[in-house]
């Protein structure tokens, strides 16, 4: 059913991604590929894997942006440009257009936790859901002809064969920099809700009206080292004053 | 819910989990390999593993694609066409090993130095080194010389340990973390985990790096320094700290050689050396009794300044006085270095102020009494919570050794080595130089049919330990431990092919390489090296390097230049040990080692290189590899790991020793040892008692622990060597006042660069070429997703870095009329490359860069010929020569650090010119043929499709 | 957006077919004439051909029937349902004309309305996508409907001529519809030229507060599904030329020749009407190609496009 759930889901499971600490290592990208290619639905195929036009299906990708502070808030060294690594996967939107546009009912948003999934047996591969997504969260698998997307590792988070601690999405479990957090964003006391509140978590492209569940944490404000320069306490030129001070210290030891 | 039935939520991941150790880079993370139907279903980090605690990087997760890559070699190969042609025939292992013995045995009989055995990404150096030693050739090393020997040598010679993977910041306590020149490197996951901890605690993270990617991108402060000037920046910070009186005098007195007296007798053979008593103990000036006394006398109050008369009437000064005089000079004032470093004086002041403030105003204290080596009891551990980490950006310069020394000196001055919140040693470090061997390879050390008399690599204590003949000429093929690079503690692999080709210092017969892509990204001057490998002696028609044996698991560019190829297994098909005898996985709080074991069986006719080496050793009847009847001692590498003993009770693995597996460190052989490791997740960890966790260099409890564990047979405390006497010995030789004398040709160079106190000089290439002709720096950064997994045979990883571009600062783009997508010529004194460029603002304005080792040769690594890696990807290596430009003296010096021989990759100077648009980067190489009978390459991968429901 | 030939062909052909069916349903042609019977068949062929063409881009066309199920939320599903349902009156009308030489006025009217609704549904598939700002306007269904009607009238004019009599008011209606369609299209184009993008790299990353945001490195070097599907870009200069060409071929030329046909002999009128149809078809194909090629997808904020 491609109508969005009419009742407010009791849970809104999703990710919070910390742009202050993501170093762009692509760990989450490959871990996602690895988990999902042998898991939920069709494999994530790669075309021409050892050739010139190598291309593959990925459900999570890291983009890299350069930001030049022109009149904006300066948060690094004065005026310096900076790089921000930007992981992106499905945001499991509350108002997910990818669900409502689906003609077959393959795309759906789970009523119990808000996860947006594709029932691949129903997917005709029309691609309209990918068109409807402003975030590029959906990719058609060229080998299977069905739409693939982040499942929030639904086959991990409820997987009773895994240890409790491992019932998190593969990308979250593997992230070496702890830049990815998983939890219930409908619960104001959850770890992720607290992070969002404390760090000013924001939505991507709120103007699209999709109300994403996943949130992003901005880079923390930073101060300049140059502002930390202090007048030197016992400053004097050359070594003479220094040795006098040193003798004093030695006497005290 | 109605959808539940559509999704199987609780499927088991696979049939079985096998825990082993990753080998996609040098991190050595623990991995859980999930198997399903005998295939690898999923690889994830082992949560219980002390290195990665469950996390895993992109490469680790991509291990599946590494393991099943069609680039894997299938069987031993014997070259049938010319070198480089890729024409081989597959032969049996028996044939291959017999042939290798036919080549090696006569060398051993006649002149063992005619074998050069060098290993690349080798994590079994205690075995490969032992094999080479038993073979008897002096020509062995791993790849540390072109890797990061400056880091290791400067660290060990200064503080008895190094950053690298031999120590770590105290991530849980540090409040200021300063990282120099690290894009991605050893310890990559621990660094990422550590940065996350810092961020969580609100500690400050400063990154000094010309390029603001990766770690630098998330640093709280980024210092976009000009390459090769880090030493100047550090010494200026030292200047500021001295001026601000922000140094830990008590720490210096206790743990460093700051009070040691340095003889002031210019022109004499011991000028600048430490004054010593008859037993060789250094002297200090005791202020109460006003006399020079040996170090370590209880209750002594040594001076750190002044000038004192020695018993022999000569004068001496505490080394610290020399140090303070040197760095208080205004040449190290922030304003004096701002232009050269490209860092504003205010930023340098701010950095120094923060270091001083955090070290002293935010000091921490751990309430744990402990006893030092003098028997003095302390209430607890004082912590200066400032930590540092550095790698290639400092070390891959010709001034890298001194720069790294400068950084260690800075750590010692603020009392932040192995204290809470500072940089902490990982066992078996700290280890003083005196506990390291001296190098072996002098004429008297080897000979026909006998082992080398000691280890190849070590630390010369002075010129007397150099491996040179009576004329001062090098004795090793790579000229390590010669006057060219006296303290080349890791050898100089990057010089082997050039020297062997030139027959300088002598020709060799067999070049035996393991896992080192010397015909591509691991060599400077790649095209030149390929020519040397292909070059024949016109008189005889033989190759100048007559026989090349190469072992690798994959069809790298190097394979086609070998005569005999010994195919290795993948890392999931083999036994390995990550040993305390070599480079273990210890943490500051724990002694740790690990193993690998075959979690899947090879499906090809391949063998683990270490097992092959043991077999070769037995066939050659090398002592230590056969018993007195000539029978092989070890069945395979697994057997060696368990049963080999280096000293009684000390073997490759420290855990589960003793017949019942209950002993740690020292203990009898346990035949079930590997089983116990596997049950334990393929690692072993022994916690260091809290009392022994800090100040290990001077902590009685730790030193006793180290002896008990078998690191040493007696305690080995370390006194930090701010003033380096060994370097001064070389200067005395260069001054012609102390024997052995340095050759005339080398004297000025030694005098210029062997300052016993950390020093900065202009990198050699920058000094040798005109700043007008080559105004910019060009460097590489190691991409996190491919660092140490440089092959492009991995279908998932290669999609991230399918080709590389040269990133050029906006200012240079504007000056040259360059825009994204343009092509440019980048020109060095040695060569030129034509490459695609892209604009970048977040980098040093005089520096351009690209990702390391993305360019590949078409056809290598089982790739198609027209892949982007080969068409548009490129290597910076073509611009870098193994020798510096010719100078007036008629000599061509190695493009290396003059102390350690470390390859100076990052000294490169270039100019850039806009080029016509292109389709192919230049230089472009003929495509490589796939060697042997290669595996078919699929047109599409649907890995795991059979498991979908 | 990638201008996929299958989709361009689908929407152009089915638009023409539905337009023609509307005109037939409204009874503009004598049902007894062979030309009218041919027109009925052509309308069905165009509609069916268009629908078949649209399945060419499906990953799993064998499941296409499922697309009829989600009419409550999905414009694509509604289009499918309407397309299938519309066949009923259209077939009935065609049957009546072909075999009974008669017209069923109510069925014809119903068919006409359903055709228009189907075209509207097709347009709304695109117009409802907020991620593609160029499409997300009422001008999109207006254009689709007007192009369909204009095409229908051009075809009707042709069949009327073939049937022997092109009435002046059909030609006038055709010219009016063409004028309206191209006026709407130019309004659509002006909107495209002048609109401020609602989503930018700054809003896509949320990092605009720090400074000017630009893509530095793509996540993977080569193209992927998203960049192939949504990364197509046509140069503005190029697009301007094409829109002029489309208007000339698909608007001005058909209008002129239709008017000329009304005062020409039958033979020449047939040629003129055929020319009008050919011009309109070409213009529509170019217009439809530009509809995709000019539309920028919000996801390109993440891919530097």
Image (spheres, coloured by chain):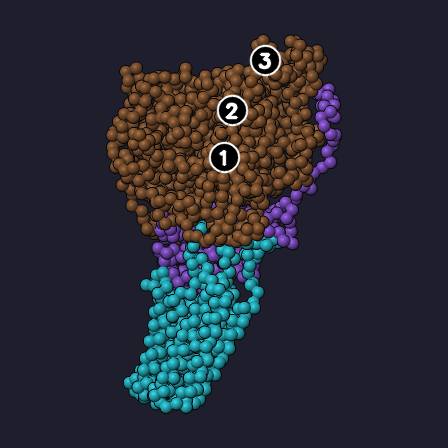
Q: Chain of mark 3?
A: B
Residue under pointer 1: B885
Picture quadrant where residue B789 is located:
top left
The x, y position of residue C167, in whole percent, is 41, 90
Mark 1 vs mark 3, foreground winner is 1
Query: Which subunit holds the residue at mark 2?
Result: B
| Residue matched to label 3 | B281
In the image, C137 versus B129, the foreground residue is: B129
Q: Earlier in the sequence, mark 2 or mark 1?
A: 2
For disc 2, the neighbor class at 10 Å (few under 14, some 14 to 19, many from 20) is: few
- Residue B587 image position (x, y, % from top left): 51, 30
Q: Is residue C115 visible?
A: no
Q: Which one is nearer the viewer's eye here, B857 or B404?
A: B857
Rendered brown, the chain in question is B
Quadrant placement of the N terminus of chain B: bottom left
Give the colour of chain A: purple
Q: Are marks 2 and 1 on the same chain?
A: yes
Does residue C187 appear to the left or right of C277 in the view shown?
right
């Amino acid at each position: 059913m491609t109508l969005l759930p009419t009742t407010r889901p009791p849970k809104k499971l999703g990710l919070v991604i910390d742009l202050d600490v993501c170093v762009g290592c692509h760990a989450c990208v490959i871990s996602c590929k690895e988990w999902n290619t042998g898991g939920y639905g069709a494999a994530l195929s790669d075309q021409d894997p050892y050739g010139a036009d190598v291309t593959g299906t990925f459900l999570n990708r890291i983009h890299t942006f350069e930001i030049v502070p022109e009149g904006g808030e300066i948060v690094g060294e004065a005026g310096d440009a900076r790089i921000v690594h930007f992981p992106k996967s499905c945001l499991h939107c509350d108002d997910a257009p990818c669900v409502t546009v689906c003609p077959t009912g393959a795309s759906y948003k789970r009523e119990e936790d808000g996860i947006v999934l594709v029932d691949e047996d129903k997917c005709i591969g029309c691609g309209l859901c990918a068109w409807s997504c402003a975030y590029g969260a959906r990719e058609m698998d060229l080998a299977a002809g069905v739409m693939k997307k982040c499942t929030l590792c639904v086959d991990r988070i409820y997987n009773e064969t895994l240890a409790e601690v491992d019932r998190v999405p593969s990308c979250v479990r593997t992230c070496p920099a702890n830049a990815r957090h998983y939890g219930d964003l409908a619960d104001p006391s959850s770890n992720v809700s607290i992070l969002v509140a404390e760090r000013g978590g924001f939505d991507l492209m709120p103007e699209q009206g999709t109300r994403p569940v996943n949130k992003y944490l901005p880079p923390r404000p930073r101060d300049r080292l140059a502002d930390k320069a202090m007048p030197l306490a016992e400053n004097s030129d050359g070594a003479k004053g220094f040795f006098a001070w040193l003798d004093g210290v030695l006497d005290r030891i | 819910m109605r959808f539940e039935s559509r999704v199987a939520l609780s499927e088991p991941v696979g049939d079985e989990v096998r825990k082993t150790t990753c080998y996609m880079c040098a991190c050595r993370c623990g991995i859980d390999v999930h198997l399903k139907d005998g295939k690898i279903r999923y690889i994830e980090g082992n949560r219980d593993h002390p290195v990665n605690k469950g996390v895993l990087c992109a490469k680790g997760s991509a291990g599946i694609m590494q393991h099943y890559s069609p680039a894997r070699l299938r069987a031993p190969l014997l070259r049938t066409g010319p070198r480089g042609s890729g024409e081989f025939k597959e032969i049996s292992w028996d044939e291959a090993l017999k042939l290798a013995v036919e080549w090696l045995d006569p060398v051993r009989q006649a002149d063992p130095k005619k074998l050069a055995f060098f290993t690349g990404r080798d994590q079994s150096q205690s075995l490969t080194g032992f094999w080479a030693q038993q073979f008897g050739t002096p020509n062995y090393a791993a790849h540390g010389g072109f890797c990061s020997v400056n880091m290791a040598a400067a660290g060990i010679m200064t503080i008895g340990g190094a950053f690298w993977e031999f120590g770590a910041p105290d991530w849980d306590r540090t409040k200021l973390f300063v990282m120099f020149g690290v894009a991605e490197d050893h310890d990559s996951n621990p660094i990422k985990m550590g940065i996350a901890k810092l961020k969580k605690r609100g500690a400050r993270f400063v990154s000094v790096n010309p390029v603001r990617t990766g770690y630098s991108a998330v640093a709280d402060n980024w210092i976009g320094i000009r390459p090769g000037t880090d030493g100047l920046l550090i010494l200026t910070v030292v200047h500021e700290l001295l001026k601000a009186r922000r140094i830990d005098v008590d720490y210096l007195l206790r743990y460093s050689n700051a009070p040691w007296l340095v003889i002031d007798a210019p022109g004499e053979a011991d000028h600048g050396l430490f004054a010593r008593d008859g037993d060789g103990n250094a002297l200090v000036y005791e202020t109460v009794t006003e006399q020079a006394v040996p170090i370590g006398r209880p209750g002594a109050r040594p001076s750190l300044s002044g000038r004192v008369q020695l018993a022999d009437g000569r004068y001496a000064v505490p080394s610290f006085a020399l140090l303070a005089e040197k760095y208080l000079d205004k040449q190290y004032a922030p304003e004096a270095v701002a232009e050269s470093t490209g860092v504003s004086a205010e930023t340098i002041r701010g950095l120094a102020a923060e270091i001083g403030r955090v070290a002293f105003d935010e000091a921490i204290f751990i309430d744990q009494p402990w006893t030092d080596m003098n028997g003095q009891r302390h209430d607890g551990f004082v912590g200066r919570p400032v930590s540092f980490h550095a790698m290639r950006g400092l070390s891959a310069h010709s001034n890298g050794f001194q720069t790294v020394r400068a950084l260690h000196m800075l750590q010692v001055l603020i009392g932040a080595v192995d204290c809470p919140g500072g940089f902490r040693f990982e066992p078996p470090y700290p280890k003083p130089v005196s506990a390291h061997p001296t190098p072996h390879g002098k004429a008297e050390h080897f000979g026909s049919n006998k082992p080398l008399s000691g280890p190849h690599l070590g630390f010369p204590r002075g010129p007397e330990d150099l491996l040179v003949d009576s004329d001062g000429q090098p004795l090793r093929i790579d000229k390590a431990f010669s006057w060219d690079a006296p303290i080349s503690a890791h050898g100089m692999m990057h010089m082997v092919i050039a020297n062997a080709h030139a027959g300088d210092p002598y020709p060799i017969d067999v070049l035996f390489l393991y896992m080192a892509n010397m015909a591509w990204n691991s060599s400077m001057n790649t095209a030149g090296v390929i020519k040397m490998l292909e070059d024949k002696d016109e008189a005889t028609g033989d190759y100048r390097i007559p026989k090349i044996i190469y072992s690798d698991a994959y069809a790298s560019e190097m394979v086609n230049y070998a005569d005999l190829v010994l195919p290795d297994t993948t890392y999931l098909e083999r036994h390995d040990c990550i040993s305390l005898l070599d480079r273990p996985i210890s943490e500051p709080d724990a002694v740790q080692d690990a193993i690998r074991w075959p979690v899947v069986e090879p499906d090809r006719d391949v063998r683990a290189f270490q097992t092959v080496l043991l077999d070769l050793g037995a066939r050659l009847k090398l002592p230590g590899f056969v018993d007195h009847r000539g029978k092989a001692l070890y069945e395979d590498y697994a057997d060696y790991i368990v049963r080999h003993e280096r000293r009684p009770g000390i073997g490759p693995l420290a855990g589960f020793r003793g017949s019942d597996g209950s002993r740690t460190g020292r203990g009898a052989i346990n035949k079930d040892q590997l089983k116990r490791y596997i049950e334990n997740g393929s690692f072993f960890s022994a916690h260091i008692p809290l009392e022994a966790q800090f100040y290990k260099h001077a902590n009685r409890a730790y030193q006793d622990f180290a002896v008990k564990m078998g690191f040493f047979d007696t305690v080995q405390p370390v006194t930090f060597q701010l003033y380096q006497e060994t370097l001064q010995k070389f200067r005395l030789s260069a001054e012609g006042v102390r024997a052995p004398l340095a050759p005339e040709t080398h004297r000025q160079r030694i005098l210029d660069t062997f300052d016993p106190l950390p020093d900065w000089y202009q990198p050699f290439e920058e000094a040798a070429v005109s700043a007008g002709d080559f105004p910019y720096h060009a460097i590489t950064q190691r991409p996190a997703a491919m660092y140490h997994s440089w092959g492009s045979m991995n279908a998932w990883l290669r999609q991230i870095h399918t080709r590389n571009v040269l990133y050029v600062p906006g200012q240079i783009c504007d000056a040259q009329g360059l825009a994204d997508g343009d092509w440019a010529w980048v020109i060095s004194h040695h060569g030129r490359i034509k490459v695609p460029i892209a604009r970048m603002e977040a980098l040093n304005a005089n520096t351009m860069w690209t990702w390391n080792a993305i360019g590949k040769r078409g056809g290598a690594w089982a790739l198609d010929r027209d892949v982007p890696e080969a068409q548009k990807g490129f290597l910076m290596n073509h611009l870098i020569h193994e020798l510096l430009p010719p100078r007036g003296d008629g000599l061509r010096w190695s493009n290396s650090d003059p102390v350690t021989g470390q390859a100076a990759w990052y000294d490169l100077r270039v100019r850039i010119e806009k080029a016509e648009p292109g389709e192919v980067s230049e230089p472009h190489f003929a495509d490589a043929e796939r060697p042997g009978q290669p595996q078919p390459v699929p047109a599409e991968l649907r890995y795991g499709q059979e498991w979908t429901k | 957006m990638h201008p996929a030939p299958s989709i361009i062909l689908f929407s152009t052909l089915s638009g023409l077919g539905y337009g023609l069916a509307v005109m037939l349903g409204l009874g503009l042609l004598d049902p007894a004439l062979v030309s009218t019977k041919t027109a009925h068949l052509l309308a069905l062929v165009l509609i069916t051909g268009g629908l078949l063409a649209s399945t060419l881009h499906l990953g799993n066309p064998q499941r296409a029937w499922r697309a009829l199920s989600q009419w409550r939320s999905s414009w694509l599903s509604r289009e499918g349902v309407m397309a299938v349902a519309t066949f009923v009156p259209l077939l009935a009308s065609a049957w009546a004309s072909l075999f009974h030489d008669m017209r069923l006025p109510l069925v014809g009217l119903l068919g006409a309305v359903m055709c228009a609704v189907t075209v509207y549904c097709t347009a709304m598939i695109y117009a409802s996508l907020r991620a593609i700002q160029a499409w997300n306007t009422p001008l999109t269904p207006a254009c689709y409907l007007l192009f369909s009607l204009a095409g229908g009238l051009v075809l009707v004019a042709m069949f009327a001529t073939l049937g022997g009599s092109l009435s002046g008011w059909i030609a006038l209606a055709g010219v009016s519809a063409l004028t309206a369609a191209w006026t709407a299209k130019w309004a659509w184009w002006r909107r495209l030229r002048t609109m401020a993008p609602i989503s930018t790299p700054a809003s896509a990353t949320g990092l605009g507060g720090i400074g000017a945001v630009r893509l530095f490195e793509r996540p993977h070097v080569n193209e992927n599904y998203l960049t192939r599907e949504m990364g197509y870009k046509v140069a503005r200069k190029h697009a301007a030329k094409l829109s002029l060409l489309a208007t000339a071929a698909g608007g001005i030329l058909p209008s002129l020749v239709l008017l000329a046909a009304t005062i020409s002999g039958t033979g020449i009128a047939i040629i003129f009407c055929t020319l009008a149809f050919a011009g309109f078809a070409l213009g529509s194909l170019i217009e439809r190609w530009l509809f995709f090629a000019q539309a920028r997808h919000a996801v390109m904020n993440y891919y530097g496009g």
